Image (cartoon, rainbow, N blue to C red):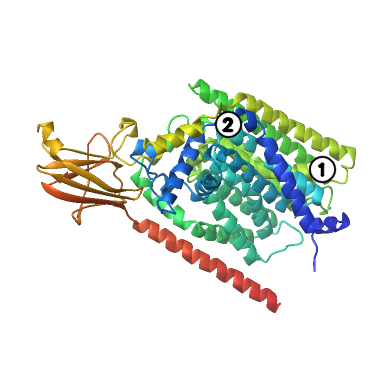
Amino acid sequence: MTVSFAETNAANLNVSAKQAWLYALLVSLATSLAIIFPFFWMGNASGHDFSFHVASWMDAAAQWHQGILFPRWTDGANHGFGEPRFIFYPPISWMFGVVLGLVVPWIFVPAVFIILTQILAGMCAFALGRRLFPPRGALVCAVCYAANPYALLIVYMRSDFAEQLALAFFPLLFLAAAELLGLFDPPVRSARHSIVFLAITFAAVWLTNAPAGVVASYSLATLFAWTALTKKSWRPLLHGTAALALGFGLAGFYLVPAAYEQRWVNISLALASGLQPSQNFLYAVIADAEHNAFNRIASNTAVLMIALTAIFAVLSLPRGRSTAPPLTKSLWSALVALLVAAAFLMMRVSNVFWQVLPKLRFVQFPWRWMSILAVPFAIFISAAVVHKRMRGYRAASVIVAVLAILACTATYMVRHTWWDSEDVPVLLQALQNDEGFEGVDEYDPVGDDHSLLPEKSERVTVTPADPEAKEKSLSEAEITVQRWTAERKEIHIATRELAVLKLRLLDYPAWSVQVNDAVVVPEQTGESAQITVPLSTGSSHVVVRFIRTPDRTIGALISGVSVLLALLIIQRSTGRLKVD
């Protein structure tokens, strides 16, 4: 029976596994509280994506109260006209936000989200660190990852809660990949177990944030290719491909509809001016002063991370032929490969790769590669601290210096971000008043320009079929809204003349419209994709349902098959271990 380096050191220091995890939890909690400390007197840090995420949480929470546990249509978007946001935005983050909203007041949900997410980030980093270092080094890894500069940028200036949560899984993603590639000595899992472990963590990233999923995909591809090259073996590529394929399959219930239904929305607007990679390389300048100011801060953060990671990579460099802890040569070189790849893709010289590599341009901001850079950042610092040359005051000095740099970075961002305690109450009141909130360009259905939609309108209006008809004819129309939920609308209309029913709802292929139990094809106004339905004289019962399209069914089947395959792999692998 083999014993890992971390377990040996834990035993030498009389620290049990339970105690080590408890210390990790306490340290991660303390780090998280330190990060959100300014929130206690300044309110919420209202970064670029704050309103988008909070509105999504509130909208999904309202649908939970309607009995819709897995929303697809965002009812409050576009001031009540809706959009298919939940088809395209991964579910884990907004469902997590909903759960928190059911437990604590909405005004506190962003801060609680940050606390719990950074605790998770610290614990995942500790899980990675204890595989490499003694307890002290693993705790340093937890702190450095939970409070890395990019995490601070997200917390204070971006408020991209989904990406922040996805980053919490990155240490486990690297841990799973390193185990599969044999970068740890000794191995603790069989290859089959490692494939499933990597597939699950990879799927978790994709189900949390799509740009993080793209970064994770190319980062893992870099690791697989680098390991195959250095080991001169095809096995890393084969095992890695199998893990990624299984991971994509597990996330199929989200990925298949999100990929297929892009043809139904203006997805190209995700790369509108200001959001293109070419405009967001390090220190890029465009004709937008506000954009340039933020990009300069993001660029400074990236340069700081690159510099610190490179310095500590040199300090933790394995010497001679030694493969002794804290880092083996193969693991060290793999981390450096990630560092070089991340740094390269943030610079303008990499522009051709952003143009030709599939889906890479949808990451939008090259400095997002700091997300994967945070892993070698935390590992190299921890490795330097526990290195045999770092004893006593030297190690303490390094820790103090790193913490001081992180504190200064946080202080700078706190002073340059936007603080607002009114965003959450305003959004909540708008939803309660049935006024909704702004939509997103890239989720706007094809044929619509959501900027032309009125901010305030009735759910149902009836107009004469003949534009020249007198308005008084409408006064005799009887309108009864029998049901109005995010995925089902039922209206009864009685009119003495031919009329047109206009719904506060945007047309989308998943909407099925029935009039008196007969399926009809909805019309549009011409100015927007608002659903209009021609009505005959007399009584009309209109039912509009958001149906399950074939792509959603196919995605669910792929995920189901992938889950069964993962269970089969684990069962066969466990059975083989018992026989051996």
Left or right for 146, reference 520: right
Q: Is residue 338 visible?
A: yes
Mark 2 is surrounded, within 10 Å at the Cα level, by few (under 14), some (14 to 19) or many (20 or more) other residues, namely many
Residue 549 found in image quarter: bottom left
The answer to whether one can see residue 379 in this image is no
Front in this rendered view, residue 384 or 9? 9
The amino acid on which the numbered mark 2 sits, given as a three-letter code, is: Ala
The N terminus sits in image quarter: bottom right
The disc placed on residue 385 is: 1
Q: Are marks 2 and 1 in contact (CB under 8 Å)?
A: no
Give residue 45's mark.
2
Name the residue at 69% across, 50% down: 123
Q: Amino acid at mark 1?
A: Val
Q: Residue 330: horizontal and vertical position, in percent?
A: 73, 52
First-in-chain label (2 vs 1): 2
User: Residue 191 location, x and y as percent?
Assistant: 65, 65
Q: How many marks?
A: 2
Q: Nearer the viewer, residue 576 or 97?
A: 97
Q: Is residue 173 left or right of residue 288?
A: right
- Determine crowd level at label 1: few under 14, some 14-19, many 20+ residues with C-alpha closer than 10 A: many
In percent of the image, x 9 and y 43: which residue is there?
A: 496
Q: Quadrant of the C terminus?
A: bottom right
At mark 2, the secondary structure is strand
Q: What element does badge 1 sit on? A: helix
